[in-house]
Image (cartoon, grey):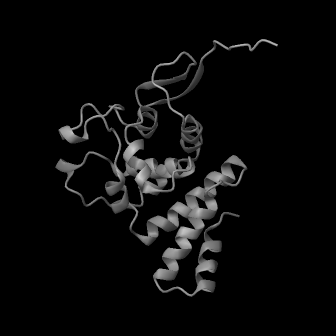
Amino acid sequence: MRTECKREKLEFQPCGARQVIGEFSGGTITSDGGVLLLKEIDAKRKITSQFAACFIDHRDKKRIEHKVAELVAQRIYTLALGYEDLNDHDQLRSDPLLASVIGKTDPTGNERRRVTDRGNALAGKSTLNRLAEAEPLMRRVVEIIAEFSLATGHPHPHLRAVFDNYFSLLTEMGYEESKAIEKIKSLLPG
């Protein structure tokens, strides 16, 4: 039996001014096309924008290259794609599809201010680590990953790892195990 190749295009919601079309003719290729579906869910549920609104950005506006909303979206989308480790972001930061979905106007990163950052549109592990150090952030990540699981109707494969990381953080902060478990359960939707 011969394989039938479809020539039709898949159209997704635009990312800023960029049109996003899935074609099967080569070009710049990514293995993380599922981020387009996450963006579709997020566009309807406004999960990352609501989360980003919880932050007060005290950074020097003249030196900012990554908005808080972009950093939050980058971390949440990549967690949902299965990239738990911040070290992965040293490679992911050059992914033009991820950059487009997050809202970067220069998804190739070729217009970055610092020459050493050019070619990398997104934040690296060090920038994201500074964002992820606080307990309130980790707590919200648990809620968001649980909401994504609920929205898709399937348990996220890394939901357990996110719970484990938050549990470890709580116990390191001095919570008794039973109280840490209660706190995690209180964050689950429904």
| Left or right: 104 in relation to 30 | left
In percent of width and height, residue 97 lies at 46, 33
Front-lying residue, 134 or 52: 134
Quadrant housing the C terminus? bottom right
Residue under the image location 56 percent in, 87 percent down: 176
User: How many labels were placed on the picture?
Assistant: 0
The image quarter in which residue 128 lies: bottom left
Front-lying residue, 189 or 173: 173
Q: Is residue 66 above or below residue 9?
A: below
Q: Is residue 74 above or below residue 133?
A: above
| Left or right: 128 in relation to 11 | left
In percent of width and height, residue 179 lies at 60, 84
Residue under the image location 52 percent in, 75 percent down: 168
Residue under the image location 38 percent in, 50 percent down: 71
The image quarter in which residue 3 lies: top right
Residue under the image location 63 percent in, 85 percent down: 178
Farthest residue, direction front: 1
In percent of width and height, residue 100 lies at 42, 33
Quadrant housing the N terminus? top right
Front-lying residue, 103 or 132: 132
Farthest residue, direction right: 1
| Left or right: 70 in relation to 7 | left
The image quarter in which residue 94 lies: top left
